[in-house]
Amino acid sequence: MTSYHLTESEAIKTRELSVLAARLSNSLPIVISGLLLDLPEEMRKPLLNFGADSSAGGHFLLRGLMVDDLPETPAAHGMASLDDHFTNGTLMLVADLVGSLVGYQDEKSGALFHDVHPVRGEEHRIENSGSVAFDFHTENVHHPLRPDFLGLLCLRQDHEAIAATRLSSVRDALPLLTEDQVADLRKPQFHSLYPTSFTRHTEGPRPSAGPHPVIFGSADKPFIRFNSHNTQAADAGGERALRALGEALEHVCRDLILAPGDLVVLDNHVVVHGRSAFQPRYDGSDRWLRRFYSLRSTPLWAQRMMRHPRVLPAMADIRGVV
Ligand SMILES: [Fe+2]
């Protein structure tokens, strides 16, 4: 199963639990585990299975969640108007079913819930605030503790309902490549620049991480670590392999147009994602998604460095550790 549409009574029950969970975002993950058991069985079971093994498609779509009446779509960064909103609880419950909700100290000061909406003047930024096409990437490509999953909940669609969340599974794409290309992609010869969302407040050139392979894992269950904007090859052979990979990912891509109340969960090691372009109007009713990250387990050494129970340490403190 790759999707589930909640019944009305299941959506109401999930909303009730979300209200309770939203009050617990500063608590240890164990505190909300009791709420997880009360989630509707038909929704809980496939998500638990997806968390254990996301299969070749690498995504699960939950439909029919409640989002209620909403304020205007924020126009700028830091205008978070949903601080205590129950959808925070919905995101937390789903994130904790597949892993544990986490944030990153370096990104948006460790925020656990990320607003994704266009910001005037940032149309061309390749991050949440942009509206030009955002090419394929896995999330936080530079990071040793990359999220295992991310979730995107749609609160509001773009006016024309054309902005698509684009998904491509590495397991669909690799059969389109030659053995030599795959062998090149498996070599630890690539570097990835830190995404701009991690360097918003730093001066100078963006640092990079690596060398790392773009493809890893067994031949029958391969994984991917790749950001088409930020991952660079060491030589011309690596460049060609990256180009071929990009074309293969494009070939197998599925476009998902999320409607309000849709929440898609992605396995960040199996699918790359992107977004097609759209035309914002900055009239308070622009496209608005909310995002979470989820990690199956945090190493003990990292847990002991965390200043908040769910926020991973800054790169400056862990660079080179793993
Ligand atoms: Fe992304």
Image (cartoon, helix red, strand yellow):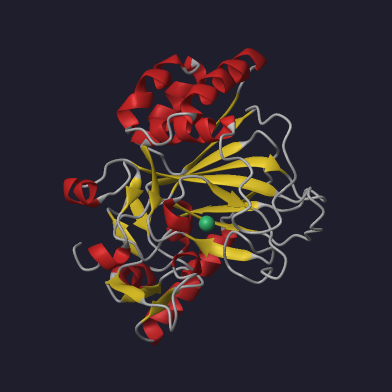
Taking depth in this image into account, of 242 and 296 the one nearest to the observer is: 296
- Residue sitting at x 21%, y 68%: 320
Question: Is residue 286 shown left or right of residue 171?
Answer: right
Residue at horizontal 53%, vertical 46%?
Answer: 291
Q: Is residue 273 above or below residue 203?
A: above
Q: Position of residue 302 (x, y in %)?
A: 22, 51
Question: Which one is in front, 181 or 265?
Answer: 265
Question: How many numbered marks, from 0 up?
Answer: 0
Q: Is residue 143 visible?
A: yes
Where residue 251 appears, as percent x and y from the top left, is 58, 60
Q: Quadrant of the C terminus?
A: bottom left
Residue 158 image offset from top left, x and y in percent: 76, 50
Residue visible at 34% across and 54% down?
A: 222
Instruction: Please tell me which residue is depicted at 32% across the width and 33% down the height of the picture.
Output: 28
Query: In this view of the protein, can residue 221 be seen by the observer?
Result: no
Quadrant in the picture for residue 63: top right
Q: Is residue 146 above or below residue 237?
A: above
Apparent side of residue 11 relative to residue 235 in the rendered image (left or right): right
